[in-house]
Image (cartoon, grey):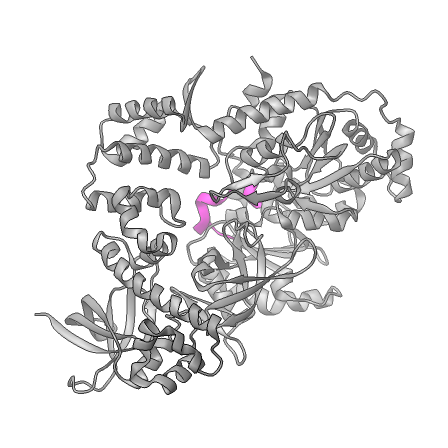
Amino acid sequence: MSVILEGTLERVTYYNEANGYMVGRLRPAPGGGRAALVTFVGHLPPLKPGESLRLEGQWVDHPEYGRQFKVSSHQVLVPHTLDGIEKYLASGLVRGVGPATARRLVKRFGKDTLRVLEEEPHRLTEVDGIGPHRARAIAEAFARQKDVKDVMLFLQSVGISPSLAVRIHRHYGKDAVAALRENPYRLADEVFGIGFRTADRVALQMGVPATSPNRLRAGLRYALREMAQDGHVFAPRERLERAVAETLDVDPDLVAAETDRLAEEGPLRVERFEEGEAVYLAPLHRAECSVATRLRDLLDAGREENPPSPEEVYAAAAEAGIKLSPEQRDAVSEALCQGVLIITGGPGTGKTTIINSLLRLCRARGLEVILTAPTGRAARRMTEATGHEARTIHRTLEVSFSPTGGLEFQRNEDNPLEADLVVVDEASMVDLVLMHHLLRAVQPPTRLVLVGDVDQLPAVGPGAVLRDLIGSGVLPVVRLTRIFRQAGESLIVLNAHRINRGEMPVLNEKDRDFFFIEEADPARILETVVSLCSRRLPQRLVEMGMSPDPLADIQVITPMRRTLIGVDNLNLELQKVLNPPGWGKAEISVGGRTLRTGDKVMQIRNNYTKEVSNGDIGIIRAVDRETGQVAVVFPGELGPRDVIYEGEELDELVLSYATTVHKSQGSEYPVVVMPVSTQHYVMLQRHLLYTAVTRAKKLVVLVGTKKALAIAVRNNRVEARFSRLAERLRGP
């Protein structure tokens, strides 16, 4: 039998953003027969303390948590008491109104406060501290949150979780319902965080036929995008259509017919090759063809009529106090002789020395050089190592937003880069699409030098460009194999090369920089990692003559997100000890997680408006609970800078005391700590271990079992990526 409870939400004990499951505490309304706080559970939209609720459901006895109210439906009521109105407004529900402003509003307007906000917002200026501009902002925010609730009722009726409903409303506003009715598959294309499966579930619940062309097209796009996220440039047609038919539970012939139609209309490209047919998303097909054509053009135009002599190269390097080996000298010389040159080598093999010598030689010859790298972190490292300004590839190409919201590269074939030589560092991180845009802006006689370590993880995006370019056998390649004396004194460097050769690393030599702590139990590994980061390693850094900053100096890198020693749990445990709650530390709850002043956070998607990139790490400088804003300090190319996040943008930030190997690419840290456990069996791979180890400058500490370490060292399986770039370079 259903029971109805009314009262005020006292606090949210737990909330799962993904499915809307909430555990909360309700203070029953006076006269309801209950005085004590009531625990309730159920699937609800995000709610704030202070909101007045009518809950319908039934009482249940949980074997562990005791008696609680299980909610089947709910209604948000307009609060009637002065205390209820103040709590409602102070909850952060209305942007720009925090506890202090709520108190002043209620003091001025009393029980009429909510009516004034809705009907006479101009009167808000009667309150001290609220001018006309702020009054308008508060009124607009109040109106928006009312719209949210109306739209969310519809969205939840078609099976959308409360947290996703908030995102949909944020994107479409009051037009959300109309957008979904027109084509619910738009969600997967247009709303961050919503994939095809969610959109498909909504569409089917709204009555869209299982064989609808919109559904088949969305299924094909979804499958191809999923493959692109896994690094593939195309999908074998038979495999693609079989997978889509299974996902949609439809006849494969229907999928094949839709593939042909999309290829005729242009969104897809189908190309025959020896093994069958390749299906591309049109932009990836265009990028692959363009990269191959433009690289061949650069190569054909590249021979230098006045190549530098060995003496000229040695003299230019000597001015900077650099002594080159013969293979380094040849690399510097070839960079000015070839239209395109690839330089690849592991840590300690002198890649930076070559770049510095090349800069000196170009300066002596009066040549203009542009240094660039795929990430801000890599560009900053390049600048520090050379003393010559390096920029990200996006900044080098002068990216801006188009009127439709896409990206426009101001540097292209019509407005090429003005330089004699373009040097790209960390080239293994450049994906196919970014390489396409870079090459559009590099026109002969400009020369291109790609510097990187082909044995590291390939780019997160589609393609394994550096590997394909080397594998094609068409472009000139300098392979650096010699480890230089100073680098050779580091076990980090020596062990990186041992791992890359499939040999076990040398461990725990006294006064060296590579250590292994044996722990088999994941719970003990977790305890050890936390202890290392909070106490033992900062003390070791002091002994090494450094002034340790655990947040900046120590990075935990782990292969997986989930499990006890995965990224998600490690971040929670490390936050507790490295940045616990304290006086003066404001914090804000975002779904089921807490962001606090002083937290180390990472941006998880490119945001070109804010000029922060996927993988950038910063520190939360301030949290404004009145407005819901969070200020994060990021290192910039021109020095540290503040980036302000509104409350609805906080899903772009995650804690980053621990991060994945993929997210660590392009970065260097003084100290790297890495769990190595059979709990991560599927991710125990040589190239992952190699990439993680090469992120460290001063110290590596592995925690786990030698069995797991040996599995990783032996496992040289590199998953192939579907790409035809190498074949295109070789030509017909």
Q: Looking at the image, can residue 713 be seen?
A: no
Q: Which residues are magenta?
A: 675-690
- Residue 410 x/y as whole percent: 61, 38
640 to 56, vertically: above or below: above
How many marks can you see? 0
Which residue appears at 30% of the width and 65% of the height?
A: 146
447 to 379, vertically: above or below: above
Q: Quadrant of residue 260?
A: top left
Q: Nearer the viewer, residue 223 or 518?
A: 223
Looking at the rendering, in which quadrant would you find the N terminus?
A: bottom left
Q: Looking at the image, can residue 600 be seen?
A: yes
Q: Nearer the viewer, residue 618 or 318?
A: 618
Whether residue 650 is in magenta: the answer is: no
Q: Is residue 580 left or right of residue 498?
A: left
Type of secondary structure dominating the magenta stretch: helix
- Residue 552 x/y as whole percent: 63, 62
Identify the residue at the far left of this view: 1
406 to 42, vertically: above or below: above
Which residue appears at 64% of the width and 40% of the height?
A: 397
Q: Quadrant of residue 253?
A: top left
Q: Nearer the viewer, residue 15 or 659?
A: 15
Looking at the rendering, in which quadrant would you find the C terminus?
A: top right
287 to 727, vertically: above or below: below
Q: Is residue 549 left or right of residue 1?
A: right
Q: Is residue 592 left or right of residue 485?
A: left
- Residue 243 x/y as whole percent: 32, 31
Q: Is residue 313 left or right of residue 91?
A: right
Which residue appears at 58% of the width and 57% of the height?
A: 617
- Residue 622 x/y as whole percent: 55, 70
Whether residue 678 is in magenta: the answer is: yes
